[in-house]
Amino acid sequence: MQNNIKDVFFDLDHTLWDFDKNSELTFENIFNKNHPTIETKIFIEKYVPINQACWKLYQYDKITHAELRYNRLKHSFDAIDYFISDEQIESIAQEYIDLLPENNHLFDGTFEVLDYLKQKYKLHIITNGFAEVQFKKITNSKIGSYFQTITNSEMAGVKKPNPIIFEYALDLAKAKKENSIMIGDCLEADVQGALDAGLDAIFFNESRVQVSNTIKQVNHLLELKKYL
């Protein structure tokens, strides 16, 4: 239990908003309509690690937003030996972005833990996602009212783990780093990024990967009550 904490910062995708589930439903919708021979499950098996690798490059400005959108699809279609034109890839990329915020599965315990935390702390979001899409996700999933501020990488001009985005979020929230904690699913971007910027951090380890016991972690959102 931490008594000095006043501001709690959450990541969005893979932490509150169930990105993998919502993403799979979106692809299923797109493929059923326009590419019925693709088995969504097989595509997703290839897409998930490819998307993660592309996001990592994007996180460190090694590729652009446009390259991220194109590469993750192109490499996934190549991996399942499905020929598709660049025009079709561009069309799917746009349709995916448009449809993704229509699916809004949240992780189990999201509303319960936000109701609990809101009584005691000011709540905020820091996300590397694209502003327009993230805003739709937050609105459509009905969690917007819990958060006093929302910082995205487009506003800050940099992405987690860059300390500048944490500084930006703290300024926006009028919060002090010594009274703040970050909760997220990415060890590098959320946890180490926050710690390096001077905030405390909790790792949302839903997939139960092995991590050092020096890192605060939870496997389910409701376990946050142990720390907060």
Image (tube, helix red, strand yellow):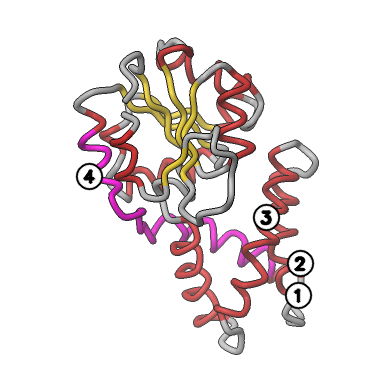
Q: Which residue is mark 2?
A: 75
**x, y percent for residue 169:** 49, 21
Tell me if 99 is positioned left or right of 165 in this view. left
* Magenta-drawn segment: 89-116
- SS for dot 3: helix
Q: Amino acid at mark 4?
A: Glu
**Picture quadrant of residue 8:** top left
**x, y percent for residue 111:** 25, 45
**Badge nearest the viewer, 3 or 1:** 1
Vertical relation: 38 (above or below) 53: below
Contact (Cβ within 8 Å) of mark 1 with mark 2: yes
**x, y percent for residue 70:** 72, 58
Mark 4 residue crowding within 10 angstroms, few (<14) / some (14–19) / many (20+):
few
Vertical relation: 63 (above or below) 179: below
Tell me if 23 is positioned left or right of 65 in this view. left
Q: Amino acid at mark 1?
A: Ala
Q: Amino acid at mark 2?
A: His
- SS for dot 1: helix
Residue displayed at 45% across by 64% down: 21
- SS for dot 2: helix
- Mark sitting on residue 79: 1
